[in-house]
Image: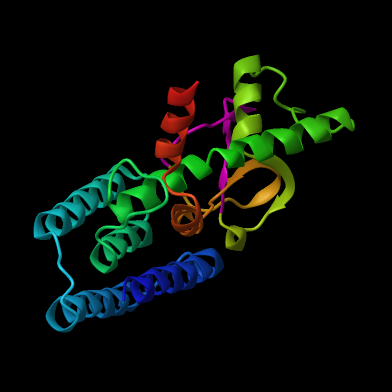
Amino acid sequence: MEFARLILVLATLLYGSYYDWKSREVYDRVWILSSIVGVSLQVYEVAFLGHGVDLATVIFSIGITTAAALAFYKLGFFGGADAKALIAVSLILPAYSGPSSIHPFASLTVLTNGVILTVFLPLAYALWNITRLASGGKLFEGFEAEPLWKKTLVCFLGYRIREADPEKFMFRLEKELNGRKVFSISLLKDEEFASGQDIWVTPGIPLLLFFTAGFILMIVWGDIISMALSFFLRR
């Protein structure tokens, strides 16, 4: 029955990721229904299949995940769907013994794996910008007065596009100050989606996509942190 719950988590995350990418909105019923089904499967396992359950592990998993998800949401690092997704995972699959892990809490592994995978985004942005600069692109035209460290940083955070459409879910990386363009860099994006021509933007990538990838990685390889620790300890 654990396999059924794994499939349920994967299906829920894939479904949520699709709608998060498409409209940046995932209905609460997605998380509620999947959680109800997941909890029901666990009750069936205990009541009818005789599978034991470590109640302390289950309670801690749900509790710590809920606390972390709500904290990140309140701080502005998460969207509501991201927090609800993690809580749903903790309810459906409180614990999981993967190929490599430093703890049994599946939802926390999904979180850490997903967050670590986001590191590849800045690298991809930087590579794209370097390619454009090498081909003669005038990425910093109008920003000549900006310091080098800011120019370098924005290359890792986004890119310059000809026209920004609010329906593409992008945020501005620039603003006008005293009649000139300056870079505007903030980790917490709460402004409206960008619109305009020839501006620097950073895409609002749904974190659910990375949670889904983090979950798949957990099943196939395990916990990235655990694998990294094992690698360095063997050296």
Expressed as whole percent of the image width and height from the top left, the position of residue 10 reads 44, 68
Residue under the image location 89 percent in, 33 percent down: 135
User: In this image, 87 relative to 171: left or right?
Assistant: left
Expressed as whole percent of the image width and height from the top left, the position of residue 141 reads 77, 28
Expressed as whole percent of the image width and height from the top left, the position of residue 160 reads 71, 40
Q: Is residue 185 magenta?
A: yes
Towards the viewer: 109 or 20: 109
| Residue 233 location, quadrant | top left
Q: Is residue 34 magenta?
A: no
User: From where the camera sits, is residue 179 visible?
Assistant: no
| Residue 172 location, quadrant | top right
Residue under the image location 27 percent in, 52 percent down: 105
Q: Which residues are magenta?
A: 170-188
Residue under the image location 19 percent in, 57 percent down: 62
Quadrant in the picture for the N terminus: bottom left
Expressed as whole percent of the image width and height from the top left, the position of residue 96 reads 31, 57
Rendered view: 25 above or below 103: below
